[in-house]
Amino acid sequence: MADLPFFSDADFEQYRTLIYHESGISFTPTNRSILESRLKERLRENGMDSVKTYFAAISKDKEELKAFLDSITTNLTRFFRNQAHFDALEHSIVPELLKIRSGFPTTLKIWSAGCSTGEEPYTIAMLMQEILPPPWKFEIIASDISLKCLMTAKEGFYADSRITGIPDNYLKKYLDKVEGGYKIHADLMSKIRFDYHNLKNDSGLRNLDIVFCRNVIIYFDEAAQAAVINRFWDSMASKSFLFIGHSESLFGMDTKFEFVKTEWATLYRKFI
């Protein structure tokens, strides 16, 4: 298992087609080595030595297919990642939404799509808890294709090395020091619903005020990106906002979203 001499070009095409069909994630020859590495792990886990045998297995076993897709995703995240987005949320987007929604139901609905191990939705929750005036409330739906990441997120435990970036006042207010790290307060955890979701499919969510999907669509090709973005449009309320990664853009994409530039960061809005 030191290498995959039997992972032929034909095998690679077969796997990349399946991955694209099931998740929208696009593997190219330049990142083939990543796929090979993850395949080695899954073969070892399943006691197999043939990529053909494993392909037959994931073609029939939906749970193993989920585990395989889980293994090929990259889950790099941290609390308050790209602080400028949270500054824009606090100083521009939330105040604007409170004006727009004045007289309407007093709950802001937020989706953290591709939430990984939970740092993003917990960051959003801490910030919203701080800045929303009564009687306003918020609810967060956090989703990911990785069941392993969702388990970590639901547990709400983070090692000492993982809490870098959380302001001291937030750390004291929303996390408890426990052996080996920190635990998110139960009341903050109750504001977030974690759920498995493959962005290739409609989430079923509607009337969302804010969507975060950062550093996710970069792994999709243009067609898959457009499909995901258009599904976000369908899930969002009139006059709502979309955050994507700072290295991602909707420029040149056939989408109805408008580009928004604030003093702190750029984002997109649905304004109909």
Image (cartoon, helix red, strand yellow):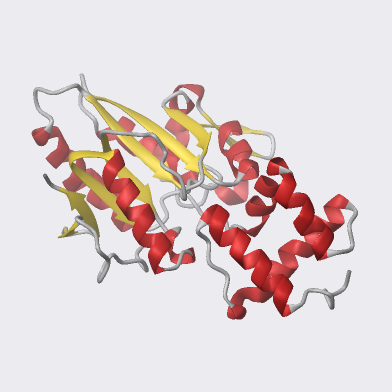
Image coordinates of residue 159 in percent, x first then y, are 63, 44
Image coordinates of residue 142 in percent, x first then y, are 45, 38
Q: Image height check: is 32 above or below 134?
A: below
In the image, 30: left or right of 239? right
Q: Image height check: is 20 above or below 91?
A: below
| Quadrant (top left, top right, bottom left, bottom right) of the C terminus | top left
Q: Nearer the viewer, residue 46 or 138?
A: 46
Residue at 65 percent of width and 43 percent of height: 148
Say which quarter of the image contains residue 155: top right
In this view of the protein, can residue 60 be seen by the observer? yes
Q: Image height check: is 39 above or below 103?
A: below
Say which quarter of the image contains residue 218: bottom left
Residue at 56 percent of width and 53 percent of height: 22
Residue at 62 percent of width and 41 percent of height: 147
Image coordinates of residue 54 in percent, x first then y, are 80, 57
| Quadrant (top left, top right, bottom left, bottom right) of the N terminus | bottom right
Residue pushed farthest top? 135
In this view of the protein, can residue 159 be seen by the observer? no
In the image, 131: left or right of 244? left
Image coordinates of residue 44 in percent, x first then y, are 86, 57
In the image, 33: left or right of 259? right
Q: Nearer the viewer, residue 74 or 123?
A: 74
Q: Image height check: is 85 above or below 103?
A: below
Residue at 37 percent of width and 39 percent of height: 111
Total numbered labels: 0
In the image, 9: left or right of 251? right
